[in-house]
Amino acid sequence: MIHRRVATEVREALRWQPAVALLGPRQVGKTTLAQQIGSEMNAVYFDLEDPDDRDKLRQARTLFDRYEDRLVILDEIHRLPDLLLSLRGAIDRGRGRGRRAGRFLILGSASLDVLRETGETLAGRIAYRELLPLDILEIPADPGAQEALFVRGGYPEAFLAPSDVVSFRGRRDFIRTYLERELAWMNPRLPAETLSRLWTMLAHAQGALLNASRFAGSLGLAVPTVNRYLSVLSDLLLVRKLTPVRANIGKRLVKSPKVYLRDSGFVHALLELPSFDALVGHPVAGPSWEGFVIENLLAVAPERTRAGFFRTAAGAEMDLVLDFPSGERWAVEVKWSRVPRTTKGFHLAREALKPDRCFLVGTGPDRYPVTDEVEAIGLRELAAELLARTSPVPVPVP
């Protein structure tokens, strides 16, 4: 069993909020984590994909009042969003009887949809926590585990599979399930075959500037339709659009976002790359490593950190710029190399951005100064530094 860092946060939130929403993609372990917490708190569990459980919730008010002294777990809440109105009433009635915290744990796979619904209905009554795929600080600290996380991705079943072949087949089946089931439910007008082609195109374009017109032309779709597809994939936490950082430097800046499939294992499955040996010779290896590093760093960055990239028409480029709530800025350049080296574009970007700290992240674990202003560092160590900024006390790392 791999300990998920967010578990502590969920338990703590349940001590002071009546409702906690645990959001994240399918199959990252939300149900498993919720049931672990539920077993500690004598919880009652309802799966809103189960017709029998949905029937029980037709009399939600009566049911919630009956279980007022127990934690109620509602899985796949986005399947029955109208239920949120009943939660609000139950929470307010419970408050009147002194039951102020630990009433509901709701799970959802479509994060932004859930946020919109609960933001209006349960304002002041709910805390939000996000469970993402496994990151570098949730796995053993050895090179083999990092390689497996990169090749297989962070979905627990894919990472923990007994072999690369089993993991690869499982990821292909999972992608097919998403196309045929989850995305079709989200928007029936999204043809599975078209989405499959779009996913494959996104994998080939990992880390590139978004060119919706090119995607639209290749798919025979209108640009607004492609943008709508990408919005759905972003809502489901499958795609990240990394926006450019603005700077008043008097030079022409790139304005398009960079687009990534958020899980490296999906990239490799879509491109038929089942192992590290198959990956290293493929052109996507560098961009996939870049996306992998970015996702791992953002998974542990402090709340309200603004993330972007920097690029100018003159060739200045920085893969990741982190602006912390404190006003401090870090700049990170990612290299597909054990011994990362700086480039002219990197130095131009650093001069324009003027970061407080600047890092080169390669594939190796070594940490050493490159110049007085630039430090080479391994992904795990940089992630640990970011997590330390998030946590007021030291967090144990496996």
Image (cartoon, grey):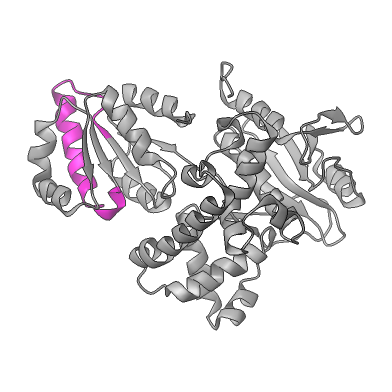
Residue 1 seen by the camera? yes
Residue furthest out toward the top: 393
**In the image: residue 80, left or right of residue 151:** left
317 to 390, vertically: above or below: below
Quadrant housing the N terminus: top left
Q: Which residues are magenta?
A: 76-104
Rendering quarter of residue 371: top right
Q: Position of residue 48 (x, y in %)?
A: 23, 49
Please report the residue visible at 82 percent of the width from the left and 41 percent of the height from the top: 338
**Most foreground residue, 255 or 248:** 255
24 to 105, vertically: above or below: below
Residue 94 falls within the magenta-colored stretch: yes
Residue 262 seen by the camera? no
Q: Position of residue 254 (x, y in %)?
A: 75, 61
200 to 273, vertically: above or below: below
Please report the residue visible at 54 percent of the width from the left and 73 percent of the height from the top: 197
Rendering quarter of residue 311: bottom right
**In the image: residue 276, left or right of residue 81:** right
**Most foreground residue, 214 or 151:** 151
Rendering quarter of residue 168: bottom right
Q: Position of residue 276 (x, y in %)?
A: 69, 50
Q: Position of residue 73 (x, y in %)?
A: 25, 37
**In the image: residue 358, left or right of residue 178:** right
**Most foreground residue, 68 or 323:** 68
Please report the residue visible at 52 percent of the width from the left and 74 percent of the height from the top: 224
